[in-house]
Image (cartoon, helix red, strand yellow):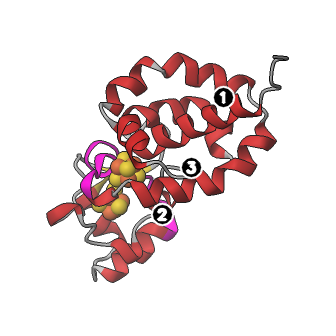
Amino acid sequence: MHQPGKEQDLMRNWEQKSAVRRKAYAQFLRDADKNLILKQLPELHEEAFTRIDCLGCANCCKKYSPRFKTPDIKRIAKVLKMKEGDFIETYLKLDEEGDYVVKSTPCPFLGDNNHCGIYENRPSDCRRFPYTNEDILVKRKQLTLKNSEFCPIVYFVLEGLMKQGMNDLPQKDQ
Ligand code: SF4
Ligand code: SF4
């Protein structure tokens, strides 16, 4: 059952706590039962998004860029009534992996009160972030660890998974 007091404690100074727990997260992601994690993710993901308000955070939009894949570029350029080439030239650059990302952060589409100016048409990466309901969470461990440093939802989900993992351990004989 949800316990508001305990949850407030969990989220208090979460950035410092997440930094301290980084090694524990790495070990957990390496050793945990992947199938069990995937079963537990949907509920924790839902709960995290109920408890944590992205509009009060926007760390991902402020500090990092999604990849703008070809369908994203086509869709967004059309909505902005721009030629795709002009859209790319105005907003994007290629990163070291050959993906288009925003030229500078915060994202140029981040508007007042942390609203996304292209929300309905935002890149697929933005829709999927922070991957807390996908197997990417366990498959791309380094990405998950990096995201845990700035995304409170990733922190919340990892803590939840680890807590449930503890509860799933066989009980010692009394
Ligand atoms: S960093 Fe995480 S909690 Fe913050 S806005 Fe992005 S997805 Fe939401
Ligand atoms: S496109 Fe919108 S959701 Fe995606 S990073 Fe930019 S402001 Fe955030």
Q: How many marks?
A: 3
Q: Which mark is residue 29?
A: 1
Residue 127: mark in rendering: 2
In the image, residue 92 sits, relative to residue 29, either above or below, namely below
Q: Residues within 10 Å of mark 1 (few under 14, many from 20)?
A: many
Q: Quadrant of ligand 2?
A: bottom left
Q: Relative to 92, say whether 151 is above or below.
A: above
| Mark 1: amino acid | Leu
For badge 3, the amino acid type reads Thr
Q: Which residue is mark 3?
A: 132
Image x and y of residue 12, in percent: 31, 35
Q: Is residue 87 visible?
A: yes
Q: Position of residue 136 (x, y in %)?
A: 64, 44
Marks 2 and 1 in Cβ contact (< 8 Å): no
- Percent of width and height locating residue 112: 14, 65
Q: Is residue 41 above or below residue 144?
A: below
Res 101 seen here: no
Are the two marked residues, 3 and 1, in contact with CB atoms closer than 8 angstroms? no
Is the C-beta separation of discs 3 and 2 under 8 Å? no
- The location of residue 45, given as percent across then percent down, is 56, 54
Q: Residue furthest front?
A: 174
Residue range highlighted in magenta = 56-71
Q: Considering depth in this image, is 151 or 101 the residue closer to the camera?
A: 151
Q: From the viewer's perspective, is 25 left or right of 92? A: right
